[in-house]
């Protein structure tokens, strides 16, 4: 691969690219939905989705998407409308996602574990006028609809797309008269003429909620160009391994949630880009995942978070499954992968890599070469067409090689803006450069090593958790005077949520009481696992929570306990 000297001078890490990875790409200017149409055109009979034994081919998926897209237009959904997808991994998610993109609507990703208050915030913030949801969360959605009227609600039962299970009905699910049943809507629409909605690549495609410097979630707006660039880059990055397989053997294990852009890009969109079969599981259950792995002779790719990988590599059946032969490539992201876990993968002869990305960078950004040099604890080198500089927080100037600075990134992967939040957009985007909040250094080979986070983000089990959001919930409890939440190291989840609480003087409160309260107002993965009571919490002179002080105390305590045990 020839790299021009002027490009190599600008991006010296290009010399470490695998042979199959181009230093720059000519991205097609079509809308993201063309990714599906193109694959359906050339791989019509290839299985697109496998869901508990039920298969949908790429051609049938394409036609079903068109039918739903036409029905949504008939129901009044317009280009630019925000529509929430509040579903676990399922064929229904895949169909709804591509159908919304086909008509130029904007997908609002919603975690199925969100509470009513969390859903309400996301829908109100985006002005969402539609929602795809499912039967087991109907009590929450009905309660939400009493406070925030959703004009269009479409409901499914996840097993409706399993041939061996009966299809539910609107009456059986007890839906209000004005709500719609997913399968019944599809039956009503037999129009297979593709909609003629004009979409350009700068149009918004996805709103992915992430945390902010204020602790209030903000919606990163990802365009059709972002989705196309990410899908093409992710596909090309794996070419040195996955590209050697014929399409007939390409099969991706989809345990990453589609409702987050990480799973949406590397599992859903990239699978469609290269014609892989998506083996879809609605939740991560280690035994179910292991049984599913055992049911197939091979997989071309399994994208994971460290928690998922640890659960499978340490499963009693791990060695029996001969994972190295079953998976051409396993890649981890969303949180740092412990060295012990990487070594475990090596011991099992697994072809493993990991990388770094953000919601604001369409989940990609910096990653280890697939075949090239992998440095322990490094997140790797930037993707094609991506510039990275490390900036001094005080001066705003780039630091010298080897010195620590904040990662700034400029790339076709970077979001256009935060939805309805010009102030936060201005804070994070500077002349096309995204300020990531991650502190890192670049070694002599231009590999990047993260050393800290300037933000207080907690990453537990691959989920991003913003501690101030938990603080705010605890503050509302009548027995809590002060609260500071931190992430403490955890061998399995990466980090565990711990809250330090100062009770109101003269009252009695238990950890169990506060944890139960948090469960009412927060998604399960955000609820503190540990609560410690203190008479006073560390704050600066201006009242800023000194989270780092508490976290450092915890790390020191854990280290001391470990030394005592040894």
Image (cartoon, helix red, strand yellow):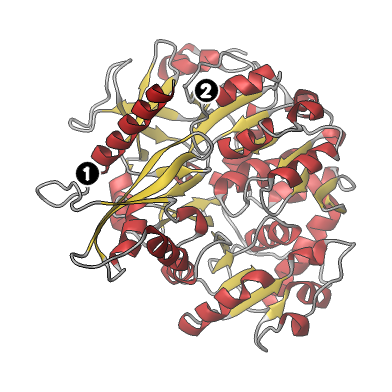
**Which residue position is annotated with label 1?**
546
Asked where in the image residue 16 lies, by quadrant, the reply is top right
Residue 494: image location, x then y, percent: 48, 37
Q: Earlier in the sequence, mark 1 or mark 2?
A: 2
Residue found at x 42% / y 28%: 387
* Viewer-proximal residue among 3 and 299: 299
Residue 441 in view, yes or no: yes
Quadrant location, the N terminus: top right
Asked if residue 402 lies left or right of residue 349, the reply is: left
Residue 162: image location, x then y, percent: 84, 61
Q: Residues within 10 Å of mark 2 (few under 14, many from 20)?
A: few
Q: How many marks?
A: 2
Q: CA distance from mark 1 to mark 2?
A: 29 Å
Q: Residues within 10 Å of mark 1 (few under 14, many from 20)?
A: some
Q: Which mark is residue 339?
A: 2
Asked if residue 337 lies left or right of residue 391, the reply is: right
């Amino acid at each position: 691969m020839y790299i021009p000297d002027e490009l190599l001078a600008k991006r010296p890490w290009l010399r470490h690219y695998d042979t199959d990875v181009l230093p720059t790409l000519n991205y097609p200017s079509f809308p993201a939905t063309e990714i599906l149409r193109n694959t359906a055109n050339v791989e019509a009979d290839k299985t697109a989705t496998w869901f508990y034994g039920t298969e949908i081919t790429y051609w049938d998926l394409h036609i079903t998407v068109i039918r739903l897209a036409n029905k949504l237009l008939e129901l009044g959904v317009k280009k630019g409308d925000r529509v929430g997808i509040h579903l676990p991994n399922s064929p229904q998610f895949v169909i709804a996602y591509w159908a919304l993109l086909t008509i130029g609507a904007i997908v609002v990703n919603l975690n199925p574990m969100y509470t009513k208050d969390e859903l309400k915030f996301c829908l109100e913030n985006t002005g969402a006028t539609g929602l795809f949801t499912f039967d087991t969360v109907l009590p929450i959605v009905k309660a939400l609809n009493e406070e925030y009227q959703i004009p269009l609600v479409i409901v499914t039962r996840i097993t409706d797309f399993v041939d061996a299970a009966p299809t539910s009905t609107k009456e059986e699910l007890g839906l209000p008269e004005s709500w719609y049943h997913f399968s019944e809507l599809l039956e009503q629409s037999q129009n297979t003429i593709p909609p003629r909605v004009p979409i350009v690549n700068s149009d918004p495609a996805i709103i992915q909620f992430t945390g902010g410097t204020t602790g209030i979630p903000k919606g990163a707006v990802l365009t059709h160009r972002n989705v196309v660039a990410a899908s093409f880059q992710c596909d090309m990055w794996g070419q040195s391994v996955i590209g050697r397989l014929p399409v007939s053997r390409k099969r991706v294990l989809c345990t990453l949630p589609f409702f987050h852009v990480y799973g949406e890009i590397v599992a859903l969109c990239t699978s469609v880009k290269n014609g892989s079969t998506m083996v879809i599981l609605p939740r991560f259950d280690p035994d179910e995942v292991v049984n599913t792995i055992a049911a197939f002779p091979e997989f071309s790719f399994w994208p994971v978070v460290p928690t998922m990988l640890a659960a499978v590599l340490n499963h009693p059946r791990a060695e029996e499954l001969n994972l190295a032969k079953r998976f051409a490539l396993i890649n981890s992201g969303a949180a740092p992968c412990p060295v012990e876990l990487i070594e475990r993968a090596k011991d099992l002869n697994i072809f493993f890599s990991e990388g770094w990305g953000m919601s604001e960078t369409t989940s990609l950004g910096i990653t280890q070469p697939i075949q090239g040099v992998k440095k322990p604890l490094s997140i790797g080198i930037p993707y094609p067409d991506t510039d990275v500089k490390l900036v001094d927080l005080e001066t705003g100037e780039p630091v010298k090689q080897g010195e620590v600075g904040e990662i700034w990134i400029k790339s076709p992967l970077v979001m256009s803006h935060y939805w309805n939040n010009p102030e936060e957009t201005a804070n994070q985007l500077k002349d096309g450069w995204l300020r990531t909040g991650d502190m890192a250094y670049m070694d002599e080979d231009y590999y990047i090593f993260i050393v800290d986070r300037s933000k207080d983000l907690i990453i537990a089990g691959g989920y991003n958790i913003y501690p101030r959001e938990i603080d705010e919930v605890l503050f509302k409890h009548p027995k809590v005077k002060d609260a500071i939440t931190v992430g403490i190291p955890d061998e399995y989840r990466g980090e565990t949520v711990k809250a330090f609480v100062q009770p109101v003087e003269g009252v009695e409160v238990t950890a169990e009481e506060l944890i139960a309260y948090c469960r009412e107002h927060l998604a399960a993965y955000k609820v503190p696992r540990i609560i410690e009571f203190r008479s006073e919490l560390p704050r600066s002179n201006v009242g800023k929570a000194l989270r780092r002080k508490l976290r450092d105390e915890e790390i020191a305590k854990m280290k001391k306990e470990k030394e005592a045990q040894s």
